[in-house]
Image (cartoon, coloured by chain):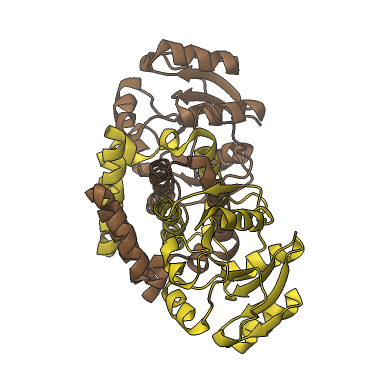
Chain colours: A brown, B yellow
Amino acid sequence: MSLSVVMVGSGNVATHISKRLNNQGVNILQVYSRTEESARLMAEKLSAEWTTDPKSLNSEADLYFLALKDSVLADFLVKSGLKNKLLVHCSGSLGISILSPYSNQYGVLYPLQTFSKSREINLEKIPIFIESSNAETEKKIFQLAKSISTSVNKATSSQRLQLHMAAVFACNFVNHMYTIAGEIMETSGFGFDYLEPLIRETCEKALRLHPREAQTGPAVRNDRNIIEKHLHTLEYDANLRLLYERLTQHISNFHKK
Amino acid sequence: MSLSVVMVGSGNVATHISKRLNNQGVNILQVYSRTEESARLMAEKLSAEWTTDPKSLNSEADLYFLALKDSVLADFLVKSGLKNKLLVHCSGSLGISILSPYSNQYGVLYPLQTFSKSREINLEKIPIFIESSNAETEKKIFQLAKSISTSVNKATSSQRLQLHMAAVFACNFVNHMYTIAGEIMETSGFGFDYLEPLIRETCEKALRLHPREAQTGPAVRNDRNIIEKHLHTLEYDANLRLLYERLTQHISNFHKK
């Protein structure tokens, strides 16, 4: 049995998930986006219909996949008039209950990954976390999730919020550390590329040893001499200096435990 | 012409560099370490002599490679009585001038990488930064560096301090973000492994796009709703909450520029 889906949204998550579902033989009936261009572009790739009107959603789909920003989802639901349909959102930080006024069959399908339109990505092994309003709905959401990835797990709304927060540290904050490192490299007259072997090895080492065991550097050794030199060098930027200090202190306290 | 080397130190850097030099045909005459066991173990692998006495260093070597912790290097130099030898340290944060009282031929060979004894590592492409007291010394240090890696670059002491600081952000601080993410995963009831695809993709994306362009997440979008949810969830740990806040603010300010 194959599910038919209406894809609501045309952002990074919607783009990647739609493509994967389509390749896996899931029938995407229609794409909704606020802007005509992105709705049409995405629909063409999927051989689907498209609309920019929340009231003109195809009413025949087995499942409505809501891949919108958290901040606009509630408003979309009010406008769309979707009633008693199987509704699934994919947010890390919204509870399942945001969908309960609209249906008895609803749930969440949260992929723990960072998506950019410009990068191809293999979804087959990304962890997907699902939550459902009842057992029957769970079967359908599980089926959909399984057509995306082999790693499908159940998680409650509060577990999912934790997962999302972990992702902020492991992805968004890590990327910002890379950005700062890149800025400092440029100050030193060398490019960001010189960090590539170090960045790759840091990543591999953490994955092999667990990062708790892999920690190195002046903060964990509490090498005040080096720390003071770095703080002195960072005097040109008070905020960056403060960030360095706070991170150093956190590492030092964490490993004293 | 092949150089003969005395390796001072038996830590992570000394272990990896010695092995690589030995494989490349550099003649390691002797290993010094404070403890007999590590001196002997490392020397056996290199078919070299060993000593635990700074005064018993082999005096015939072309080059003395000082792979000690910053904090003990000065003391070792005083004790060793090395005079007018070619001295090379490999610290990111010590200036070249720490060696000037002992010789006219001295310099630095700084490998921009994180080393652990337990992990094999390919040194062939890691960036090495060298600095030298004069042109003749530079030739020898360059020759040594080239036998380790194809990427050998010149950098002054102050450039090197910048490089080291960039490495602290790109490696030590990144690893700490992984550690925190792992802790949060464990709170949620899932293991650190579930983050592997996200961590790998974050790393690849930053290397392909430059991290400035790759930044995603609530901080760069300034999505206060999600940020407040996360801060609320982190109320159980005041220091972690503060760190989240400071990182979020730094990302937000950085991308407003």
Whole-percent x and y of residue B199? 52, 49
Left or right: residue A33 compared with residue A122: left
In this picture, is A225 found above or below B41?
Answer: above
Please tell me which residue lies in front, B107 or A214. B107
In this picture, is A65 found above or below B246?
Answer: above
Whole-percent x and y of residue B50? 67, 83
The residue lying at 54 percent from left, 25 percent from top is A5
The residue lying at 77 percent from left, 63 percent from top is B25
Q: Which residue is farthest left?
A: A238
> Can the viewer see residue B207?
yes
> Can the viewer see residue A257?
no
Q: In which quarter of the image is residue B75?
A: bottom left
Please tell me which residue lies in front, A28 or B25. B25
Whole-percent x and y of residue A231? 29, 58
Label total for image: 0
Q: Which quarter shows the N terminus of chain A?
A: top right
Whole-percent x and y of residue A176? 39, 45
The residue lying at 33 percent from left, 25 percent from top is A76
In this picture, is B145 found above or below B47?
Answer: above
Left or right: residue A148 compared with residue B185: right
Q: Which quarter shows the C terminus of chain A?
A: bottom left
The residue lying at 42 percent from left, 68 percent from top is B98
Left or right: residue A76 compared with residue B105: left
